């Protein structure tokens, strides 16, 4: 059995409601153009603030997908 190779990219997803939705947005959007997504690792969570209130939740994630020749 031959080994496999995976590429890892960094994405930032945003949501008005939660970090979970922000991560889901990033993965689902990437899945529209990338094939064979494998693993997503959340590396950073933050929020944007406007007028003293949270405006958006942001999730920075590393996503891996199988490298195709």
Image (cartoon, helix red, strand yellow):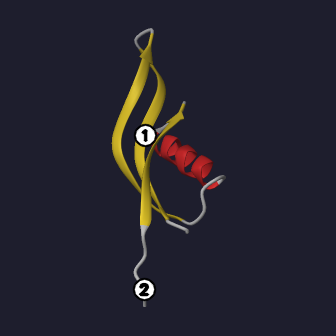
Return the residue found at the far top: 51
Per the image, the residue denoted by label 1 is 59
Q: Is residue 30 left or right of residue 65?
A: right
Q: Residues within 10 Å of mark 2 (few under 14, many from 20)?
A: few
In front: label 2 or label 1: 2
Crowd tier of the residue under label 1, counting other residues whose Cα lies within 10 Å: few below 14, some 14–19, many 20 or above = many
Q: Position of residue 57 (x, y in %)?
A: 46, 32
Residue sitting farthest toward the bottom: 1
Q: Quadrant of residue 50?
A: top left
Disc 2 target residue: 2
Whichever of labels 2 and 1 marks the residue nearer the N terminus, that label is: 2
Q: Which mark is residue 13?
A: none
Q: Residue at x 52, y 34 (%)?
A: 14
- Picture coordinates of residue 55 (x, y %)? 49, 21
In front: 52, or 67?
67
Quadrant (top left/top right/bottom left/bottom right) for the N terminus: bottom left
Identity of the residue drawn at 37% across and 49% down: 42
**What is the x, y in percent for residue 24?**
54, 48
Q: CA distance from mark 2 to mark 1?
A: 34 Å
Q: Secondary structure at mark 2?
A: loop
Q: Secondary structure at mark 1?
A: strand
- The foreground one among 1 and 20 is 1
Q: Quadrant of the C terminus?
A: bottom right
């Amino acid at each position: 059995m031959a080994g496999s190779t995976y590429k890892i990219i960094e994405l930032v997803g945003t949501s008005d409601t939660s970090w979970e939705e922000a991560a889901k947005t990033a993965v689902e959007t990437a899945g529209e153009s990338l094939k064979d997504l494998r693993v997503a690792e959340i590396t950073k969570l933050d929020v944007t603030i406007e007028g003293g209130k949270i405006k958006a939740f942001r999730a920075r994630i590393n996503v891996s997908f199988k490298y195709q020749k």
